[in-house]
Image (cartoon, rainbow, N blue to C red):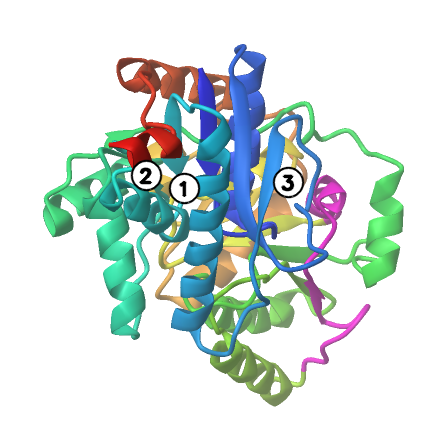
Amino acid sequence: MNIALLTHSTHPRGGVVHVLELGSALMALGHAVTIVAPAAPGQTLFRETPCRVELALAPPAAGDLAETVQRRIVALLARMLALLQRERFDILHAHDGIGANALADLVQQGVIDAYLRTVHHVDRFADARVQAWEERSIRGAARVLCVSALWCRRLRGEYGVDALQVPNGVDLSRYMPQPDTRDVRVALRHGIGIDSGRPVVLTVGGIEARKNARRLLQAFVQLRRRLPHAQLVVAGGASLLDHSGEASAFRAEAAAAGLRIGRGEAVVLTGALPDGDMPALYRSASVLAMPSLLEGFGLAALEALACGTPAVVSRIAPFTEHFLDGDVQWADPLDSASIAAALQRAVAQGRLREVPAVCRRFAWAHSAERHEALYRPLSRPLHQPAQLVEEH
């Protein structure tokens, strides 16, 4: 099949990682895959991929979220129209509301018949325009896929949409417990765990309310009473959404607790990182903290476990769907004391002796096979070439 996968960004967000990994796994099954993403001038995907990449030139992000989203929809629409002028795609699959709205416009114009949409999780937007785009992208899809049973249930209850569940995956050839020469360089660059025996709490995804960053900080303050030299590392954070309010509150709380922020300090904010640094970053940590309030799947926890690093996760779905009691340390995400206790248990646990079975159950090859099975009934060309539309 000739497959187009649309994503909303070139930055290392969970949904973008999903697209790159799925695309590579589909190519390994013999399919042709094109990844289409909006990009500002000079931007490229954060990592290389064997898939063909088509970047839709879009202006840089604006201060207004709706304007940024609209610019990206328009850019993807123009790029897809150009692609459809010269080739047929069997499957057009958007992995977010931005790409799906571009495809919905093509359906409305009669250029394509249908598209698929994967929902990782659904945000609630204060801007009515952005919220309307999100809902349209879901309701207009011929088939909706979700990476967890939680979101299948929520889409059925909130939208009346019967979504199909597909698995996420972890690349065990990339995320592994064996040390690498990059490990020391990454740790030194950010001043992570330089003092021998210093416990390192890592969280991935930046400072966001849904990531529960402020309760994690409160739990870290409690952990420092027992482990005074512990260090909190907050990695990543590239996002279209404005999290500045949450970040300001986080910094204020850290200062009030007497915690310095910076390289080698009690709290390290790495910002966006090169993709190749992530396995080393996981291995540099004593524990991966993911006490999220809202997630689509929880991929970072799988990646950390694959690197031999114990993980603390919220005792809520979707985590409870795929992790067992022995896989992770559970925490109540609404209780900072519970998070702190789970962090202490994970630090005491030490590095994992072997990769947990859950990491082997969730492989990108399995995800690609599931997608392939769902694609097959829809694998007739989902569009007519634009010139044929004009002739009619």
Marks 2/3: CA distance?
Answer: 33 Å
Query: Depth check: 255 or 237 in front?
Result: 237
Amino acid type, label 2: Arg
Kindly check if marks 1 and 3 are in contact, taking CB atoms under 8 A apart as contact.
no
Magenta span of residues: 259-284
Q: Looking at the picture, how far across and down is residue 53, in whole percent?
A: 61, 36
Q: Secondary structure under badge 1?
A: loop
Membership of 372 in magenta stretch = no
Verify CB contact (< 8 Å) between mark 1 and mark 2.
Answer: yes
Label 2 CA crowd tier, 10 Å (few <14, some 14–19, many 20+)? many
Q: Quadrant of the N terminus?
A: top left
Asked whether 274 falls inside the magenta stretch, the response is: yes
The residue where tag 2 is placed is 117
- Density class for disc 3 (Cα within 10 Å; few <14, some 14-19, many ≥20) is many
Number of the label disc, if any, that sits on residue 309: 3
- Report the amino acid beneath label 3: Thr
Residue 30, given in percent of the width and then of the height, sits at 54, 10
Along the line of sight, which residue is nearer the eye, 241 or 35? Answer: 35
Viewport quadrant of the C terminus: top left
Q: Nearer the viewer, residue 195 or 280?
A: 280
Between the C-alphas of marks 1 and 3, the distance is 29 Å
Q: Which residue is mark 1?
A: 95
Residue 383: name its quadrant: top left
Q: On the image, which quarter does residue 152 sit in?
A: top left
